[in-house]
Amino acid sequence: MKNIDIKNYKADLTTNLDIIPTIENFGVTDKQLKKDLRTVRKELGEFQDMLYAHGKYSVLICLQGMDTSGKDSLIREVFKDFNVRGVVVHSFKVPTELELKHDYLWRHYIALPAKGKFGIFNRTHYENVLVTRVHPEYILGENIPGINEVSDIDQHFWDSRFDQIINFENHLAANGTIIFKFFLNLSKEEQRQRLLRRLRLKQKHWKFSPGDLKERKLWSKYQQCYQEAIQRTSKPKAPWFVIPADNKKAARLIVAQILIQELKKYKDIAEPELDDKIKANLDSYKQQLQSE
């Protein structure tokens, strides 16, 4: 399959989740999609080795999506060919007692990838303008001065939080972090089918929580919050990509293709040259080893 057109997935101020398709298969079989993914993820693995050796950039990949949107399996399949020393995955859950004693970005900041490495955030700092907007009472647990009850959380509060997130990402980008943000755009019907599958298959029971059904009832509110977050924070140095997620195999391929196409634009990322003195003595080193 030829390279996808990234413009079809990049978000902007006009992004409308109500009209964006949630399914894609490119007119090919699942077998072909898996084959194409194997090709692209090999390229990604090779790029990761080069990024590690180069040591001046890091890559941060942010994954967001409703429950069952396929974040875990995407991580497993897209990054399968990575050297484990060059990639770190963080799954952010409900903030711990320690995390709540710091500002909301602290736990994300300390999890950022070092130069030369890929970092993957499975759920991200955007939970702080998504889940907390749907459930503003969660903000009270952050013990923020001046926020004593839900009625204190006004539009100015959310505007400030969006600005803080944009500034956070701008700071990262200015210091060598290449940022990708992916929203796995799942349809409500496909989520229903995936939840039913978790209930039908015994080996999937552990994934199910009654809380999933409570959150599902808030689907429209979540979609509104996702749309506003994507519109307001998709910037040139930290773009959002809306990925049709009803077909998991196609979604994985799209993410992988976006990553490799965008990363290849960084022409300064290359394997470091050997020191001239070492280069001049390569034959000598070979002879030493061959004569053992």
Image (tube, rainbow, N blue to C red):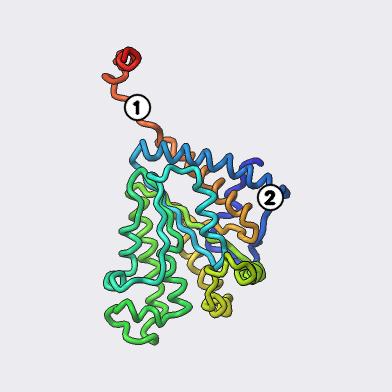
- The residue type indicated by label 2 comes to Asp
Residue 280 visible in the shown view: no
- The residue type indicated by label 1 comes to Glu
The residue where tag 1 is placed is 273
The residue where tag 2 is placed is 30
Mark 2 or 1: the one toward you: 2
Give how far apart the Cα atoms at labels 2 and 1 are. Answer: 41 Å
Compare residues 15 and 217 and report the one nearer the observer.
217
Q: Quadrant of residue 74?
A: bottom right
Q: Position of residue 108 (x, y in %)?
A: 35, 61
Please say if the residues under marks 2 and 1 sit with CB atoms less than 8 Å apart. Answer: no
Question: At 53% from the left edge and 63% from the top edge, which residue is drawn?
Answer: 13
Compare residues 156 and 270 and report the one nearer the observer.
270
Q: Quadrant of residue 282?
A: top left
Compare residues 170 and 122 and report the one nearer the observer.
122
Asked if residue 292 lies left or right of residue 190, the reply is left
Q: Position of residue 224 (x, y in %)?
A: 54, 73
Count neighbours of disc 1 (C-alpha within 10 A) and say few if under 14, some if 14 to 19, many if 20 or more. Answer: few
